[in-house]
Image (spheres, rainbow, N blue to C red):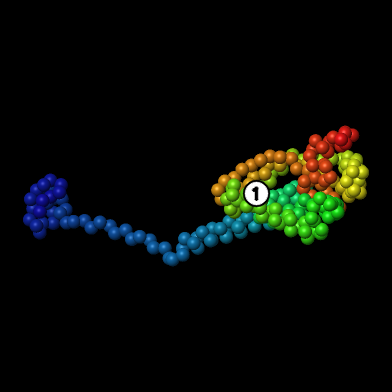
Protein backbone atom coordinates (compact mmCIF):
# COMPACT_ATOMS: atom_id res chain seq x y z
CA UNK A 1 0.00 0.00 0.00
CA UNK A 2 1.45 3.38 -0.95
CA UNK A 3 0.82 6.53 1.05
CA UNK A 4 -1.17 9.07 -0.87
CA UNK A 5 0.64 11.88 0.96
CA UNK A 6 4.37 10.96 0.66
CA UNK A 7 4.42 7.86 -1.59
CA UNK A 8 6.04 5.59 1.05
CA UNK A 9 5.49 1.83 0.57
CA UNK A 10 3.69 0.34 3.57
CA UNK A 11 2.44 -3.17 4.48
CA UNK A 12 -1.11 -3.80 3.36
CA UNK A 13 -2.30 -4.15 6.99
CA UNK A 14 -0.66 -0.86 8.08
CA UNK A 15 -3.01 1.75 9.53
CA UNK A 16 -0.50 4.61 9.49
CA UNK A 17 2.30 5.50 7.05
CA UNK A 18 5.75 4.49 8.22
CA UNK A 19 7.22 7.50 6.47
CA UNK A 20 4.95 10.44 7.40
CA UNK A 21 2.45 8.89 9.84
CA UNK A 22 -0.59 9.70 7.70
CA UNK A 23 -3.78 7.69 8.30
CA UNK A 24 -3.97 4.97 5.64
CA UNK A 25 -7.52 3.75 6.39
CA UNK A 26 -10.07 4.85 3.73
CA UNK A 27 -12.46 7.52 4.89
CA UNK A 28 -16.09 6.74 4.06
CA UNK A 29 -17.83 9.52 2.17
CA UNK A 30 -20.75 10.95 4.08
CA UNK A 31 -24.08 9.63 2.86
CA UNK A 32 -26.54 12.40 2.02
CA UNK A 33 -30.11 11.20 2.14
CA UNK A 34 -32.52 12.89 -0.24
CA UNK A 35 -35.46 14.36 1.48
CA UNK A 36 -38.55 12.69 0.16
CA UNK A 37 -41.68 14.81 0.11
CA UNK A 38 -44.97 13.06 0.66
CA UNK A 39 -47.10 12.61 -2.44
CA UNK A 40 -49.10 15.74 -3.27
CA UNK A 41 -46.97 17.96 -1.01
CA UNK A 42 -46.27 20.49 -3.84
CA UNK A 43 -49.95 20.75 -4.79
CA UNK A 44 -50.91 21.11 -1.16
CA UNK A 45 -48.31 23.81 -0.74
CA UNK A 46 -49.54 25.78 -3.72
CA UNK A 47 -53.14 25.41 -2.58
CA UNK A 48 -52.23 26.60 0.89
CA UNK A 49 -50.36 29.57 -0.55
CA UNK A 50 -53.27 30.61 -2.75
CA UNK A 51 -55.74 30.14 0.08
CA UNK A 52 -53.55 32.16 2.37
CA UNK A 53 -53.21 34.97 -0.16
CA UNK A 54 -56.99 35.03 -0.68
CA UNK A 55 -57.64 35.07 3.05
CA UNK A 56 -55.15 37.90 3.45
CA UNK A 57 -56.86 39.88 0.69
CA UNK A 58 -60.24 39.33 2.33
CA UNK A 59 -58.85 40.52 5.65
CA UNK A 60 -57.46 43.64 4.00
CA UNK A 61 -60.83 44.43 2.42
CA UNK A 62 -62.72 43.76 5.65
CA UNK A 63 -60.48 46.13 7.51
CA UNK A 64 -60.69 48.95 4.95
CA UNK A 65 -64.06 50.72 4.71
CA UNK A 66 -62.91 52.93 1.84
CA UNK A 67 -61.81 49.91 -0.20
CA UNK A 68 -65.15 48.20 0.47
CA UNK A 69 -67.01 51.23 -0.89
CA UNK A 70 -64.84 51.28 -4.02
CA UNK A 71 -65.50 47.57 -4.64
CA UNK A 72 -69.25 48.02 -4.15
CA UNK A 73 -69.23 50.78 -6.78
CA UNK A 74 -66.91 48.93 -9.18
CA UNK A 75 -68.78 45.61 -9.28
CA UNK A 76 -72.00 46.92 -10.94
CA UNK A 77 -69.95 49.08 -13.32
CA UNK A 78 -67.89 46.08 -14.44
CA UNK A 79 -71.09 44.04 -14.80
CA UNK A 80 -72.67 46.71 -17.02
CA UNK A 81 -69.54 46.91 -19.17
CA UNK A 82 -69.54 43.14 -19.65
CA UNK A 83 -73.21 43.17 -20.64
CA UNK A 84 -72.59 45.96 -23.15
CA UNK A 85 -69.68 44.04 -24.67
CA UNK A 86 -71.83 40.93 -25.04
CA UNK A 87 -74.71 42.89 -26.58
CA UNK A 88 -72.36 44.63 -29.01
CA UNK A 89 -70.89 41.27 -30.05
CA UNK A 90 -74.43 40.04 -30.73
CA UNK A 91 -75.13 43.05 -32.96
CA UNK A 92 -77.80 44.57 -30.71
CA UNK A 93 -76.45 48.09 -31.32
CA UNK A 94 -76.09 47.66 -35.08
CA UNK A 95 -78.45 49.97 -36.98
CA UNK A 96 -81.33 48.34 -38.86
CA UNK A 97 -80.07 49.59 -42.22
CA UNK A 98 -76.65 47.99 -41.63
CA UNK A 99 -78.23 44.74 -40.43
CA UNK A 100 -80.28 44.55 -43.63
CA UNK A 101 -77.21 44.96 -45.86
CA UNK A 102 -75.25 42.32 -43.94
CA UNK A 103 -78.18 39.89 -44.04
CA UNK A 104 -78.51 40.41 -47.79
CA UNK A 105 -74.94 39.31 -48.50
CA UNK A 106 -75.25 36.35 -46.15
CA UNK A 107 -78.38 35.31 -48.06
CA UNK A 108 -76.52 35.64 -51.36
CA UNK A 109 -73.71 33.40 -50.06
CA UNK A 110 -76.32 30.75 -49.18
CA UNK A 111 -78.41 31.12 -52.33
CA UNK A 112 -81.41 31.99 -50.16
CA UNK A 113 -83.76 33.58 -52.68
CA UNK A 114 -86.63 34.06 -50.24
CA UNK A 115 -84.41 36.02 -47.85
CA UNK A 116 -83.12 38.14 -50.73
CA UNK A 117 -86.71 38.86 -51.75
CA UNK A 118 -87.66 39.88 -48.20
CA UNK A 119 -84.69 42.26 -48.00
CA UNK A 120 -85.19 43.97 -51.36
CA UNK A 121 -88.87 44.03 -52.34
CA UNK A 122 -91.19 46.24 -50.29
CA UNK A 123 -95.02 45.83 -50.35
CA UNK A 124 -95.57 48.68 -52.82
CA UNK A 125 -93.00 47.28 -55.26
CA UNK A 126 -94.73 43.89 -54.98
CA UNK A 127 -98.10 45.39 -55.89
CA UNK A 128 -96.57 47.21 -58.87
CA UNK A 129 -94.89 44.01 -60.07
CA UNK A 130 -98.15 42.04 -59.87
CA UNK A 131 -100.09 44.76 -61.68
CA UNK A 132 -97.47 45.22 -64.38
CA UNK A 133 -98.23 43.88 -67.82
CA UNK A 134 -94.53 43.46 -68.59
CA UNK A 135 -93.96 40.30 -66.51
CA UNK A 136 -95.66 37.01 -65.62
CA UNK A 137 -95.85 37.65 -61.87
CA UNK A 138 -99.37 37.03 -60.59
CA UNK A 139 -98.71 36.66 -56.87
CA UNK A 140 -96.16 37.06 -54.09
CA UNK A 141 -95.40 33.33 -54.32
CA UNK A 142 -94.55 33.69 -58.03
CA UNK A 143 -92.19 36.52 -57.23
CA UNK A 144 -90.47 34.53 -54.48
CA UNK A 145 -90.02 31.54 -56.80
CA UNK A 146 -88.40 33.82 -59.37
CA UNK A 147 -86.00 35.12 -56.71
CA UNK A 148 -85.17 31.55 -55.65
CA UNK A 149 -84.24 30.59 -59.20
CA UNK A 150 -82.10 33.70 -59.67
CA UNK A 151 -80.39 33.17 -56.30
CA UNK A 152 -79.40 29.61 -57.22
CA UNK A 153 -77.91 30.81 -60.51
CA UNK A 154 -76.01 33.62 -58.78
CA UNK A 155 -74.71 31.20 -56.15
CA UNK A 156 -73.40 28.91 -58.89
CA UNK A 157 -71.57 31.87 -60.44
CA UNK A 158 -70.06 32.85 -57.07
CA UNK A 159 -68.90 29.29 -56.37
CA UNK A 160 -67.35 29.08 -59.85
CA UNK A 161 -65.35 32.21 -59.03
CA UNK A 162 -64.53 31.75 -55.33
CA UNK A 163 -65.09 28.05 -54.58
CA UNK A 164 -67.49 26.61 -52.01
CA UNK A 165 -67.96 27.39 -48.28
CA UNK A 166 -68.66 31.02 -49.13
CA UNK A 167 -68.46 33.65 -46.40
CA UNK A 168 -69.18 37.36 -46.60
CA UNK A 169 -68.02 40.30 -44.53
CA UNK A 170 -69.58 43.77 -44.69
CA UNK A 171 -67.62 46.68 -43.20
CA UNK A 172 -69.51 49.99 -43.01
CA UNK A 173 -67.16 52.83 -43.94
CA UNK A 174 -69.55 55.79 -44.07
CA UNK A 175 -73.22 56.49 -43.42
CA UNK A 176 -75.09 59.34 -45.08
CA UNK A 177 -78.19 60.26 -43.08
CA UNK A 178 -81.04 62.57 -44.05
CA UNK A 179 -83.04 64.91 -41.87
CA UNK A 180 -86.74 64.31 -41.19
CA UNK A 181 -87.60 67.23 -43.44
CA UNK A 182 -85.60 65.70 -46.29
CA UNK A 183 -87.11 62.24 -45.77
CA UNK A 184 -90.57 63.80 -45.90
CA UNK A 185 -89.68 65.58 -49.12
CA UNK A 186 -88.45 62.32 -50.67
CA UNK A 187 -91.65 60.59 -49.49
CA UNK A 188 -93.76 63.24 -51.23
CA UNK A 189 -91.72 62.69 -54.39
CA UNK A 190 -92.43 58.95 -54.25
CA UNK A 191 -96.13 59.62 -53.66
CA UNK A 192 -96.28 61.81 -56.74
CA UNK A 193 -94.31 59.57 -59.08
CA UNK A 194 -94.43 55.99 -57.80
CA UNK A 195 -97.79 55.44 -56.07
CA UNK A 196 -96.33 55.44 -52.55
CA UNK A 197 -97.89 57.41 -49.74
CA UNK A 198 -95.48 59.99 -48.35
CA UNK A 199 -95.69 58.46 -44.88
CA UNK A 200 -94.59 55.05 -46.20
CA UNK A 201 -91.00 56.28 -46.37
CA UNK A 202 -89.86 56.58 -42.75
CA UNK A 203 -86.11 56.85 -43.28
CA UNK A 204 -83.50 56.51 -45.98
CA UNK A 205 -79.71 56.19 -45.78
CA UNK A 206 -76.74 55.69 -48.05
CA UNK A 207 -74.20 53.18 -46.75
CA UNK A 208 -70.67 53.13 -48.12
CA UNK A 209 -69.47 49.62 -47.38
CA UNK A 210 -66.54 47.34 -48.13
CA UNK A 211 -67.86 43.89 -48.97
CA UNK A 212 -65.55 40.87 -48.92
CA UNK A 213 -66.53 37.51 -50.40
CA UNK A 214 -64.32 34.57 -49.48
CA UNK A 215 -64.48 30.97 -50.62
CA UNK A 216 -62.30 27.88 -50.52
CA UNK A 217 -60.38 28.95 -53.63
CA UNK A 218 -60.33 32.74 -53.79
CA UNK A 219 -61.59 35.96 -52.23
CA UNK A 220 -62.20 39.54 -53.30
CA UNK A 221 -63.30 42.86 -51.80
CA UNK A 222 -65.14 45.80 -53.28
CA UNK A 223 -66.30 49.12 -51.84
CA UNK A 224 -69.59 50.58 -53.05
CA UNK A 225 -72.58 52.67 -51.95
CA UNK A 226 -75.98 51.17 -51.11
CA UNK A 227 -79.29 52.97 -50.67
CA UNK A 228 -81.30 51.44 -47.81
CA UNK A 229 -84.85 52.66 -47.17
CA UNK A 230 -87.19 52.08 -44.24
CA UNK A 231 -90.67 51.52 -45.61
CA UNK A 232 -93.62 50.77 -43.33
CA UNK A 233 -91.32 49.89 -40.45
CA UNK A 234 -88.88 47.62 -42.34
CA UNK A 235 -85.51 48.25 -44.00
CA UNK A 236 -85.03 47.34 -47.68
CA UNK A 237 -81.74 47.32 -49.60
CA UNK A 238 -81.54 48.72 -53.12
CA UNK A 239 -83.42 51.98 -52.88
CA UNK A 240 -87.04 52.84 -53.59
CA UNK A 241 -88.73 54.24 -56.69
CA UNK A 242 -85.85 55.70 -58.70
CA UNK A 243 -83.91 56.64 -55.56
CA UNK A 244 -81.20 54.07 -56.14
CA UNK A 245 -78.11 56.24 -55.62
CA UNK A 246 -76.85 59.08 -53.48
CA UNK A 247 -76.63 61.34 -56.53
CA UNK A 248 -80.25 60.68 -57.44
CA UNK A 249 -81.48 61.34 -53.89
CA UNK A 250 -79.62 64.63 -53.72
CA UNK A 251 -80.81 65.69 -57.19
CA UNK A 252 -84.42 65.21 -56.05
CA UNK A 253 -83.74 67.19 -52.85
CA UNK A 254 -82.21 69.94 -55.01
CA UNK A 255 -85.41 70.11 -57.07
CA UNK A 256 -84.03 68.40 -60.17
CA UNK A 257 -86.55 65.61 -60.75
CA UNK A 258 -85.73 64.97 -64.41
Question: Image point 60% across, 57% down: which residue?
Answer: 54
Above or below, 3 against 246 in this view is below
Residue 25 visible in rendering = yes
Compare residues 180 and 65 and report the one nearer the observer: 180
- Which residue is outermost to the bottom? 39
**Residue underneath mark 1:** 168
Question: Image point 69% across, 50% down: which residue?
Answer: 105
Question: Image point 46% across, 63% down: which residue?
Answer: 41
Residue 86 visible in rendering = no
Compare residues 28 and 183 and report the one nearer the observer: 183
Q: Residue 244: horizontal and vertical position, in percent?
A: 79, 42
Q: Is residue 81 left or right of residue 165?
A: right
Quadrant housing the N terminus: bottom left
Q: How many marks?
A: 1
Question: Image point 73% across, 48% down: which residue?
Answer: 101
Q: Residue 21: horizontal and vertical position, in percent?
A: 13, 50
| Structural crowding at the residue carrying mark 1, measured as other residues with C-alpha within 10 Å and reported as few (<14), some (14–19) or many (≥20) | many
Q: Is residue 171 left or right of residue 183?
A: left
Q: Secondary structure at mark 1?
A: strand
Quadrant housing the C terminus: top right
Compare residues 170 and 40 and report the one nearer the observer: 170
Compare residues 11 and 78 and report the one nearer the observer: 78
Q: Residue 226: horizontal and vertical position, in percent?
A: 75, 43
Q: Residue 209: horizontal and vertical position, in percent?
A: 71, 42
Q: Is residue 214 left or right of residue 182?
A: left
Amino acid sequence: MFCERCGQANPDEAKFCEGCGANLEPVAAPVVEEASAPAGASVAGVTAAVTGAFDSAVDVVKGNDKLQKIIKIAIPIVAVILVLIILAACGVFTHGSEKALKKLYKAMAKGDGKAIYNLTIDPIELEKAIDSEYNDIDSKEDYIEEFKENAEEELDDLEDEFGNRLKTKVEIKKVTKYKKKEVKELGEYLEEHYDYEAKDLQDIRVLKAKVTIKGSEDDDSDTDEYVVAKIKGKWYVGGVGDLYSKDRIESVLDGDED
